[in-house]
Image (cartoon, grey):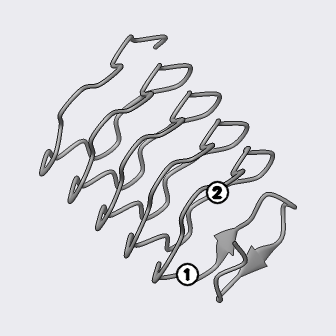
Amino acid sequence: MDADLKYADIRFTDLTGADLRYADLTYAYLNYADLTNADFQDADLANAVLNYADLTNADFQDADLEDATLVEADLKFAKFSGATVTDANFDDTYWHETMWTDGVRYDTNQA
């Protein structure tokens, strides 16, 4: 997709199945968004805010989530394989079969 969505305010939005590969979402606000099955492969989400978002089965493979905030997000079946998560905040997130940066699936927070 390669979209420029820097600083976008898309809180509470239904983006189920959205193709956001290679998108620039730095500093974007996605609080409470429904991002079920969204594709964020190779996207830049540095400093993005995804608190309380539904990220069920979202694909963050090779994405940049440096300094992103995902507090209380639902990460069921989400994939973070190869993602950069330096200083990202995953406090109180829900994990079930969530694939972490090492390519292994976990049911507990690995951040």
Q: Residue at x 56, y 28 (%)?
A: 43
Residue neighbourhood size for the residue with mark 2, other residues' Cα within 10 Å, grouped as few (<14), some (14–19), many (≥20): many
Query: In the drawing, what numbered circle is on residue 79?
Result: 2
Q: Position of residue 37 (x, y in %)?
A: 42, 51
Which residue occupies 65% across, 36% down? Answer: 63
> With respect to residue 6, does 54 lie above or below?
below
Q: Rate crowding at label 1 as few (under 14), some (14 to 19) or many (20 or more) other CA atoms within 10 Å.
A: many
In the image, residue 55 above or below residue 21: below
How far apart marks 1 and 2 lie (CA) works out to: 11 Å
Q: Is residue 41 left or right of residue 26?
A: right
Q: Position of residue 23 (x, y in %)?
A: 47, 20
Q: Is residue 82 left or right of residue 34?
A: right
| Nearest to the observer: residue 87 or residue 2 | 87
Tag of residue 73: none
Q: Is residue 78 left or right of residue 111?
A: left
Q: What residue is rendered at 18% in x and 37% in y?
A: 10
Q: Nearer the viewer, residue 52 or 39?
A: 52
* Sequence-first tag of 1 and 2: 2
Q: Which residue lies at the image location 69% right of the left edge and 72% below the top edge? A: 111
Q: Which residue ends up furthest to the bottom in the rendered image?
A: 108
Q: Which mark is residue 95?
A: 1
Quarter location, residue 96: bottom right
Label 1 residue SS: loop
Q: Position of residue 97 (x, y in %)?
A: 64, 79
Q: Position of residue 33 (x, y in %)?
A: 22, 53
Is 91 rendered above or below residue 88? Answer: below
Disc 2 is placed on an element classified as loop
For badge 1, the amino acid type reads Trp
Q: How many marks?
A: 2
Q: Residue furthest left?
A: 12
Q: Is residue 23 left or right of residue 62?
A: left
Q: Amino acid at mark 2?
A: Lys
